[in-house]
Image: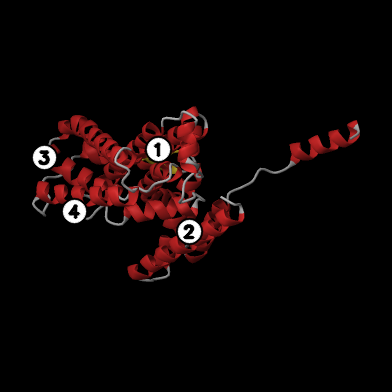
Amino acid sequence: MSSVERGGEKAERRWRLPAINPVWFILVALITAIALENANFLTPIGYMNFLKRAAPLAILAAGQVYVIVSGGFDLSVGSLITLTVVGSSMLTNNDPAATYWVIPLMLGIGVAVGVVNGLVVSILKVPSLIATLGMMITLNGLAFLWSGGAPRGYLPDTFRVFGRTNILGVPLVSMIPVALIVMVVVGILLTLLMHRTAFGKLLHAVGDNPRAAFLAGIPVARVRVSAFVISSLTAVIAGILLGGFAGVSTDVGVGYELQAITAAVIGGAQLLGGRGSVPAAMAGALTLNAIFTLLNFLGLPKPVRDVVQGLILIIAVALAMVRRRRTGG
């Protein structure tokens, strides 16, 4: 091959556009449809409130994708959200000063839940679907026992600031929700951890072929436990945000586990492990929230939203399986 041909190939590679995840195009199309349906959505208050509502799910999806990439599922995150909200309301007991030890305590509970999930899956070899389903039932029972079925107490403003407070007077956008700042910070940290560190490479290797990873000397159990801990921590953070703007409820986390999995799958995560992206999973959460928003603007009831979510999950999984078979995975 001549130097001219090699130079041409290098120039072609240099100017080749990077691959863009299709979820971003879907998100833009949905936002355009929402804007056409309701022009107020394009105002700063409109799209900032949209991002504020989507922040808990986006954070949860960012954590869920760690478990999915490692080759598992975490069905306990929704119940952990509920336990976080209910437990925080009981512990703070209307005392603003209690927030400063209740939030670290809840994060500690999240770490404990993640460690238990990870150990049961990694050491006892229980399928993650069964292990986390059992944890989901356990945490829901604990929340019910703790609250007696009717949570008492009130989340003080020092706790709710993360979920419902807006920073006003910001140039161009007029306001920025604190929840959006939390989402961006968590998203950046989890993106760097998965895509810019050795841990992220180990995580993908474990999910792609755990046996080969073990033979290569990778601490498979430790990697999987870490993935479940990260997922549980994002569930606690999501619970803190939801408690901020939704208040105290015993069903505040219901359905979030499936929404997080759906969001990750929309973002291209492979349910059998080995493939996934934090930014794409968060974009999938925004996409799912945009679908729900559009359905609400169209006046369709919640059961329709549930049907749409189920169909999205089924279609996405089917496409992922077809793609895996074609690539010989």
Q: Amino acid at mark 3?
A: Asn
The outermost residue toward the left is: 148
Q: Amino acid at mark 2?
A: Val
Disc 2 to disc 3, C-alpha distance: 44 Å
Q: Amino acid at mark 4?
A: Thr
Name the quadrant of the N terminus: top right
Pinpoint residue 28: horizontal percent, then vertical percent: 55, 55
Task: Look at the picture and state if 265 lies above or below 101.
Answer: below
Marks 2/4 in contact by CB < 8 Å: the verdict is no
114 and 257: which is toward the camera: 114
Q: Upstream in the sequence, badge 3 or badge 1?
A: 3
Q: Nearer the viewer, mark 2 or mark 4?
A: 2
Q: Upstream in the sequence, badge 2 or badge 4?
A: 4
Q: Residues within 10 Å of mark 1 (few under 14, many from 20)?
A: some
Disc 1 to disc 2, C-alpha distance: 32 Å
Q: Identify the residue at horizontal 53%, vertical 60% (top origin).
A: 319
Q: Which residue is mark 3?
A: 93
Q: Which residue is mark 2?
A: 317
Q: Amino acid at mark 1?
A: Ile
286 and 5: which is toward the camera: 5
Q: Which residue is mark 4?
A: 250
Q: Can residue 94 be seen in this snapshot?
A: no
Q: Upstream in the sequence, badge 1 or badge 2?
A: 1
Q: Nearer the viewer, mark 4 or mark 3?
A: 4
Pinpoint residue 162: horizontal percent, then vertical percent: 30, 39
Q: Which residue is mark 1?
A: 181
In terms of secondary structure, where does tag 4 sit?
loop
Q: Identify the residue at horizontal 11%, vertical 54% (top origin).
A: 149
Q: Upstream in the sequence, badge 4 or badge 1?
A: 1
Q: Upstream in the sequence, badge 2 or badge 3?
A: 3
